[in-house]
Amino acid sequence: MKRYTTYNTYLLAGLLALMGCSKKPTDYRDFLNGEELTYPGKISNSQARPGNGRIQLIWTPSPDQSITQYRVFWNNGADSLTVAANTHNTSDTVRCTIPDLSEYVYSFMLYSYDGKGNRSVSTEISNARVYGTVYIGTLNNRLTNTENLFTVNENNSVTLRFLTPDTINIRTILKYTNAQNQEAVATLAPADNELTLTDYKFGTPILYQSSYIPVANALDTFNVPRYDTIAPIYKLIQCDKSLFQERDMWGDMGIYQSDTRVSRLWDGSVGPQGYPNIFHSDGNGGMPRTLSFDMGKVYNRLAVIEETGRDCCNNPDQFEVWGIADLTNAIPEMNPGDPGWKDAMLNKGWTLLTEVKRQDNGNGAFKANLIDNPPPVRFIRIRVLHNANGENSYVNMSEITFWNKE
């Protein structure tokens, strides 16, 4: 019984082997309608250039002369685009731009097709990002150098300063009004931190907008969706001292003698002067002491004061500068040393323009900025609080100069 079963097993195996050996090498054609399976040459050097709501695919064409077109598929094959194969020169580049894409990360499958519809092995371009409103919302204009924003040069040009930008910054466009009262445009390159406007109209704002690319090979440049503003820049014009006049007010200090009057403060002298070419007060009082004068016209943007002391002594190192445009009912009948004097000045409409505190002996010329955006000013009161040498009665000064923003 056992021998019979073994024989039947060998017989069945032999029949199967005989049937297998009867297959022909070309029998697979029965499954391909009698044709051979052909794979056209695939592309090479593929890459993606991201853009704004679009993307550009780039590749080197296959040298296979049978290729008639390329097809790109994305969204799991739901979307596609056909590109004609106009060259087979591997020194050329094929470019395919796909528009109207949502902001997303895509994968693209690329195939070469011959005239019979055969297609190549696929080439995948993955992690291809398309940018849009979300990316644009993260962009900011290049930062200005707020600690040293601008310089007004001697030729009345203006140099603006910016901080070093991000490496993907492409440019910053500045829009401003020029001296001919026309809109002008200047461009700041990312490698530059300064830009000089040679024809800027002082007192007008400057708008600026920066542009970026998300990556080095980006198809599009993206603009910050808003302009930022540099506040109007003014040049400093020295106030006309020929208009200055003495204007003694209630509580002001007297003069030492007739040729050391307050008007000595605008006689045009340069540097510390000696007696009697100075303002020299009398000694009939103690600190604080005030002097006053009329600048002869109203200045709307008074900005800087320069005070020069005497060549030796009694030079103020602490004093206040007050201003007002109209003296009608504006002079408090109160000594400057009265504790309520400051409040009385404010109540009468005066503005404290600055409080100067010098750290030297008070001799040389010393400039101080006045408050930003002051009201119109014509009349000046200076309240001296302290002298550098500690002298508590006499006050000496050589020159006072003001500048206005224009």
Image: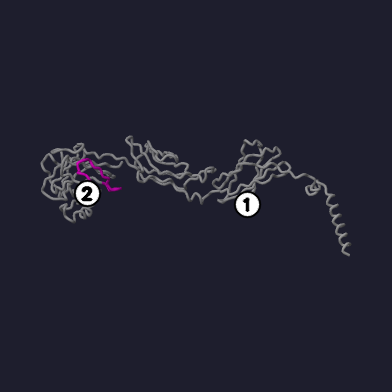
x, y (%) of residue 214? 51, 46
What residue occupies the far bottom of the structure in this picture?
1
Left or right: 28, with 267 as reference point: right
Q: Is 16 or 37 nearer to us in this picture? A: 16
Q: Which residues are magenta?
A: 358-376
Could you tell me which quadrant the C terminus lies in?
top left
Q: Crowding at label 2, few (<14), some or many (≥20) Cα neighbours within 10 Å?
A: some
**In the rendered structure, are the residues bearing label 1 and label 2 in contact, judged by CB atoms less than 8 Å apart?**
no
Q: Position of residue 186 (x, y in %)?
A: 42, 38
Alpha-carbon span between mark 1 and mark 2: 74 Å
Q: In what element is the residue under mark 2?
A: strand
Does 243 sit left or right of 192 as displayed?
left
| Viewer-nearest residue: 346 or 87 | 87
Q: Which mark is residue 320?
A: 2
Judged left or right of residue 21, residue 300 is: left
SS majority, magenta: loop
Name the foreground residue: 153 vs 34.
34
- Name the residue nearer the viewer: 137 or 47: 47
Q: Position of residue 178 (x, y in %)?
A: 38, 38
The numbered mark at residue 75 is 1
Magenta span includes 357: no
* Label annotation for residue 302: none
Q: Quadrant of residue 306?
A: top left
Within the image, what quadrant is residue 6 found in? bottom right
Q: Residue at x 69, y 44 (%)?
A: 120
